[in-house]
Amino acid sequence: MIFERLGEGDLPIHTARLARALIGCTLVRETAAGRTAGRIVETEAYEPGDPASHAYAGKRERNASMFRAPFHAYIYRIYGMYWCFNVASEPEGEGAGVLIRALEPLEGIELMRERSGSAAPRDLCRGPGRLARAFGLDRLLDGRALLLDEELYLARRVGAPPRVGTSRRIGISRAAERRLRFYERGSLFVSGPRSLSP
DNA sequence: TAGGCGATGCTCT
DNA sequence: GAGCATCGCCTAG
């Protein structure tokens, strides 16, 4: 499969708009072991001044990538055992990001299986922890520039334009009522309770 | 299908 | 010491 990289000007520099625009786009990871790629089907926006955002309390060592220029990767450890992958989304110094929550696997399914242990194709990238595991994402890739990097990058949509739905974000307690989760309607690869994806 | 809960290690208070 | 942008396994219905 040929993936056409996204470049400067292809994506909005605005957190909620970016979270919506990324639905349908492709995430690609190239390694010596092979290539994995998936269609982004679910995202969440963490805006400047958002009490639920890791950037809310200010810049720290862990969240420094959120304060970098747009489209840098912010990858952090959660619950002691999983990694989550975000895209920095505002001008340098602002502190915001888009969490990528689920992908529809397009290429490298066997490699994803090797990284994940046995898992049904539908479950390989359904949820932020699982997609990070399937793509082998960890702290080493934190801070990569996703429009320039050779190993981890964003590419153009493959297939039909998505129908995008919104809902509350999953797994947070503060500012939980804001509808900042975006997902592809009808996709079997979206995470979360069914009640959030009608 | 839904809900409860333990695993596990940072980060922040 | 509490809380956490999660997941997988268990039970109940």
Image: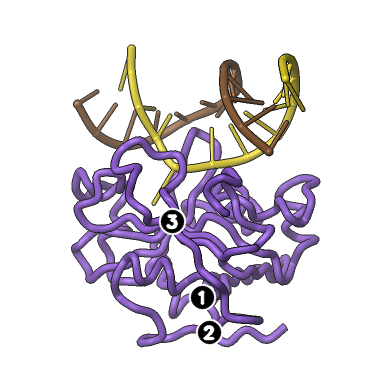
Chain colours: A purple, B brown, C yellow
- Circles 3 and 1 on the same chain: yes
Mark 3 vs mark 1, foreground winner is: 3
Q: Which residue is mark 1?
A: A154
Q: Residue A172: horizontal and vertical position, in percent?
A: 39, 39
Where on the picture, by quarter, is residue A19?
A: bottom left
Say which chain tag 3 marks.
A
Q: Nearer the viewer, residue B11 or A97?
A: A97
- Circles 3 and 2 on the same chain: yes
**Which residue is at 72% across, 57% downward?**
A112
Q: CA distance from mark 2 to mark 1?
A: 6 Å
Cβ–Cβ under 8 Å for marks 2 and 1: yes
Say which chain tag 2 marks.
A
- Circles 2 and 1 on the same chain: yes
Regarding mark 3 in the picture, which secondary structure is present there? strand
**Which residue is at 22% across, 47% downward?**
A56
User: What amino acid is found at the position of numbered circle 1 in the picture?
Assistant: Leu
User: What amino acid is found at the position of numbered circle 3 in the picture?
Assistant: Arg
Q: Nearer the viewer, residue A24 or A64?
A: A24
Q: Which residue is mark 2?
A: A5
Q: Residue A102: horizontal and vertical position, in percent?
A: 58, 57
Label for residue A181? Answer: 3
Regarding mark 2 in the picture, which secondary structure is present there? loop
**Which residue is at 69% across, 58% downward?**
A188
